[in-house]
């Protein structure tokens, strides 16, 4: 899971796909600060800024009604918020503008978070407290957020330094920066609501007049939840399906032998059945149509990266840090390298666990990978 930043994108070019395969029904239109664009009946698009290279996140307002806790027989009209933005003064101010310009005088009834990354989770506590609204999210995401926020996890700090060093990134001044960022997640997610309502794969959530089906996704975060309205052909895809950048898929220190890329690719299969006319509402980029084409593009992208790594590991054993130029075609700063190295290990682990690479732990304490004798086409895709 990402814990150092919200700039969770790969910098490698995507495999080609026909420009006509993805369609953007709203064209170049973007929501203004504090304003909302209705993208489907009762579904509104907000856009909040982020202080990173990935400079925005899309949030969603869904018209809703729920029983009044004081008078259960009375239905309260209001909104469900999907994702929140990070906790900083600019985002709080943007939400105050939303109250004035977009909520139509109606309250927030619940806050639904797709996953625990800071740009999605950061202001959940503030919105829930401000509106006395419950938080809805999956258990794995909630617990991971709680651990990261309270500092009880081993995100960042010494465990991450050791993990990076074991994969060949051992420049002392760089790792000192990594070690110092153990408090990065709490700086954007200072508190977590004390209670939540659990979402699970297959959960049906009635929001206003729409019935949303929860689709779990793995690899990018512990238990990401996308929301699919089959009747009206709308998918709130979160970070699992983005139109123009590829979601960061990384291995982290707490689970060094994991295979998140395979989990991510398998999760995409759950969305392959979506009709071509399904309106996909991503967390970054513009709403689009053509989910199956985008999945095909993402698979081709990762297949190309896997093939490049196999070629690079033929004839010599190489560590993940040495292989960064194979995957990333431009210079990376320390911040970008934290994500790039995690993603490189994710690709290498897939090939290693599929038996196409052999991983060796050398005398210098570094893991290096070389091709197996019978290595063939990458098995991940």
Image (cartoon, helix red, strand yellow):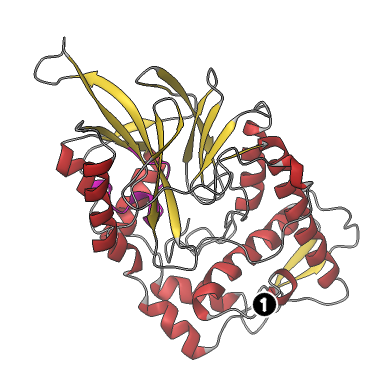
Measured from the top left, where is residue 178 in percent x and y? 44, 78
Q: Is residue 147 visible?
A: yes
Residue 209 position (above or below residue 373): above
Q: Residue at x 35, y 71 (%)?
A: 182
Q: Determine if the magenta segment contains residue 98.
A: no
310 left or right of 227?
right
Picture quarter containing residue 44? top left
254 left or right of 367?
left
Q: Secondary structure at mark 1?
A: loop
| Farthest residue, direction top | 73
How many discs mark residues in the rendered view? 1
Q: Is residue 319 visible?
A: no
Q: Residue at x 15, y 36 (%)?
A: 132
Residue 298 position (above or below residue 362): above
Measured from the top left, where is residue 151 in percent x and y? 29, 63
Measured from the top left, where is residue 329 in percent x and y? 71, 74
Q: Residue at x 75, y 72 (%)?
A: 326
- Residues 164 and 279: in front is 279
Q: Which residues are magenta?
A: 112-125
- Residues 224 and 41: in front is 41
217 left or right of 155?
right
Residue 143 position (above or below residue 10): above
Within 10 Å of disc 1 (Cα), the crowding (few <14, some 14-19, many 20+) is: few
Measured from the top left, where is residue 369 in percent x and y? 75, 70
Q: Residue at x 68, y 29 (%)?
A: 276
Picture quarter containing residue 287? top right
Q: Determine if the magenta segment contains residue 119.
A: yes
Label 1: which residue?
330
């Amino acid at each position: 899971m990402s814990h150092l930043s919200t700039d969770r994108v790969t910098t490698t070019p995507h495999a080609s796909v026909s420009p006509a395969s993805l369609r953007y029904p709203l064209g170049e239109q973007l929501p203004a600060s504090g304003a909302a664009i209705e993208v489907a009946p009762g579904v509104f698009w907000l856009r909040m800024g982020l202080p990173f290279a990935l400079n925005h996140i899309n949030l969603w307002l869904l018209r809703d009604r729920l029983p009044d806790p004081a008078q259960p027989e009375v239905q309260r009209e209001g909104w469900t918020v999907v994702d929140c933005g990070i906790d900083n003064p600019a985002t709080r101010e943007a939400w105050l503008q939303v109250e004035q310009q977009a909520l139509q005088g109606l309250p927030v009834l619940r806050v639904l978070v797709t996953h625990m990354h800071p740009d999605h989770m950061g202001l959940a506590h503030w919105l829930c407290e401000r509106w006395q609204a419950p938080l809805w999210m999956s258990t794995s995401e909630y617990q991971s957020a709680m651990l990261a926020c309270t500092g009880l996890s081993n995100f960042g700090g010494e465990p991450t330094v050791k993990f990076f060093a074991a994969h060949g990134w051992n420049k002392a001044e760089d790792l000192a920066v990594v070690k110092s960022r153990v408090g990065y997640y709490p700086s954007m997610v200072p508190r977590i609501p004390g209670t939540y309502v659990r979402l699970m794969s297959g959960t049906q959530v009635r929001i206003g007049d729409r019935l949303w089906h929860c689709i779990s996704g793995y690899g990018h975060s512990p238990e990401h939840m996308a929301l699919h309205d089959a009747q009206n052909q709308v998918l709130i895809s979160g970070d699992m399906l983005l139109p123009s950048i590829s979601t960061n898929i990384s291995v982290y220190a707490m689970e060094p032998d994991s295979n998140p890329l395979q989990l991510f690719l398998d999760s995409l299969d759950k969305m392959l059945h979506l009709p071509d006319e399904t309106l996909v509402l991503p967390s970054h980029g513009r709403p689009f149509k053509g989910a199956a084409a985008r999945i095909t593009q993402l698979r081709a992208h990762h297949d190309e990266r896997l093939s490049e790594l196999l070629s690079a590991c033929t004839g010599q054993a190489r560590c993940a840090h040495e292989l960064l130029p194979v995957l990333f075609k431009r210079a990376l700063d320390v911040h970008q390298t934290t994500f790039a190295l995690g993603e490189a290990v994710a690709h290498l682990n897939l090939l290693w666990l599929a038996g196409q690479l052999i991983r060796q732990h050398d005398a210098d304490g570094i893991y290096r990978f070389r091709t197996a004798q019978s290595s063939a086409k990458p098995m991940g895709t």
